[in-house]
Image (cartoon, rainbow, N blue to C red):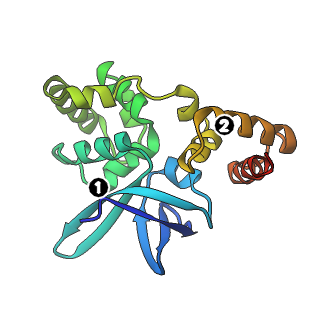
Amino acid sequence: MFAFLRGIVARKPAGAIELDVNGVGYAVNVPDGVHRRLIIDSETTLLTYCHIREDTFQIFGFLREEEKALFVTLLSISGIGPKVALTVLSGMSVQQFGRAVLDSDVTAFTRISGIGKKGAQRIILEMKAKLGQDAELSAILGETQDTVTESDDVIAALCSLGCTINEAKRAATAARKQLGNDATDEALVKAALRSMAKV
């Protein structure tokens, strides 16, 4: 179906983004991290996965290829549907997921709503088997991303809007000096974009 959708963020209901694509509004389910990073009235591109059943058609969206790849891989694990897969991606980053699997950290998964001990053990066992068979998946779950981008939603949001990592770091620092560390991520992103526009 859709490989990606590019449009304007019109609304941000809980757990989803309403994306205006040339006048057509798409409801796209997204992980919490993606939801936080996107700004209303800004243009963005979401990598999409369509989940189709007889009685349902849902679109799931991601900012990074590795997020989408992990989501699709989770769906291949027995007992994991799109709702639980999205909850996992909301509860931990791709790199945190990879470390939890490699360390057999059952507790890291049971902290996520909807996953019990048996479910956590199944995820770890099946993911380890897949890692042994798929070099690309192993690379995705490795330390391939800038850890600052992963841990800083303001920098991540700026990168998703087309800034380089260095531009995003400078603009985020300037915005925090201007507004203070207690400002919301959305306010910081807007201030950062304004400061970049003046350069």
2 or 1: mark nearer the eye: 2
Q: Are marks 2 and 1 in contact (CB under 8 Å)?
A: no
Residue extending furthest toward the front = 199
Horizontal arrangement in the rendering, residue 178 relative to residue 148 (left or right): right
2 or 1: tag closer to the N-terminus: 1
Q: Nearer the viewer, residue 193 or 130?
A: 193
Horizontal arrangement in the rendering, residue 46 relative to residue 119 (left or right): right
Distance (Cα) linking label 2 and label 1: 35 Å
Query: Can residue 181 be seen in the rendering of this structure?
Result: no
The amino acid on which the numbered mark 1 sits, given as a three-letter code, is: Pro
Element type at mark 2: helix
Q: Quadrant of the C terminus?
A: top right
Residue occupying image coordinates x 73% and y 40%:
171
| Residue 9 position (above or below residue 183) | below
Q: Quadrant of residue 64 in the image?
A: top left
Residue occupying image coordinates x 53% and y 26%:
147
At label 1, counting other C-alpha atoms closer than 10 Å, the crowd grade (few under 14, some 14-19, many 20 or more) is some
The amino acid on which the numbered mark 2 sits, given as a three-letter code, is: Glu
Residue 54 pos. (x, y %): 16, 74
Residue occupying image coordinates x 29% and y 64%:
2
Residue extending furthest toward the top = 103
| Residue 51 position (above or below residue 114) | below
Please give the residue where the numbered disc 2 appears in the rendered image. Answer: 167
Horizontal arrangement in the rendering, residue 110 relative to residue 174 (left or right): left
Residue 14 pos. (x, y %): 52, 63
Please give the residue where the numbered disc 1 appears in the rendered image. Answer: 82
Residue 89 pos. (x, y %): 40, 44
Element type at mark 1: helix
